[in-house]
Amino acid sequence: MKIVNEAKDLGEAIDPKHEVELLCSNCGYDLDEEELSADTCSNCGATLNLRQNTKIYATSIPPAGGSTLV
Ligand SMILES: [Zn+2]
């Protein structure tokens, strides 16, 4: 499953929008929410260890000022 976290303004820094993917560390199977609480992977049958893939969205922040030259 994928969890998308929206960008957060932390004050001194910005936590960019990112996506966390939860996979079985053994076979890479994409786990559903219900399967996360299981003891074993429903795909490969191994003891379930989670692997997280984090993907950061490349967002362009518009420059301050905002005047447009035509
Ligand atoms: Zn697996």
Image: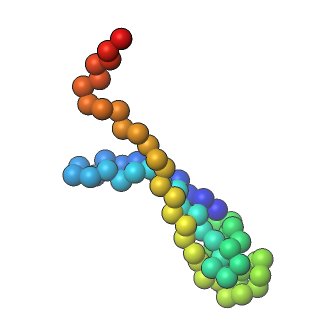
Q: How is the image coloured?
A: rainbow
Q: How many marks?
A: 0
Q: Position of residue 35 (x, y in %)?
A: 69, 72
Which quadrant does the N terminus fall into?
bottom right
Q: Is residue 2 left or right of residue 57?
A: right
Q: Is residue 6 visible?
A: no
Residue found farthest to the front: 70
50, 69: nearer the viewer = 69
Q: Does residue 41 sit above or below 7 in this rendering?
A: below
Which residue occupies 23% across, 49% down? 11
The foreground one among 15 and 55 is 55
Point out residue 47 in the picture as x, y percentages from the top left corner.
Answer: 67, 88
Residue located 68% across and 69% down the image = 31
Up the image or down, 57 lies above or below 54; here it is above
For the point 36% across and 38% down, which residue is it?
Answer: 61
> Residue 50, can we see it?
yes
Taking depth in this image into account, of 60 and 21 the one nearest to the observer is 60
Height in image: 15 above or below 1?
Answer: above
Give the residue at the far left of this rendering: 12
Who is closer to the viewer here, 38 or 65? 65
Residue at left offset 30%, top offset 32%: 63
Residue farthest along the top direction in this orientation: 70
Quadrant location, the C terminus:
top left
In-image side of 33 versus 4 (left or right): right
Give coordinates of residue 42: x percent, y percent. 76, 77
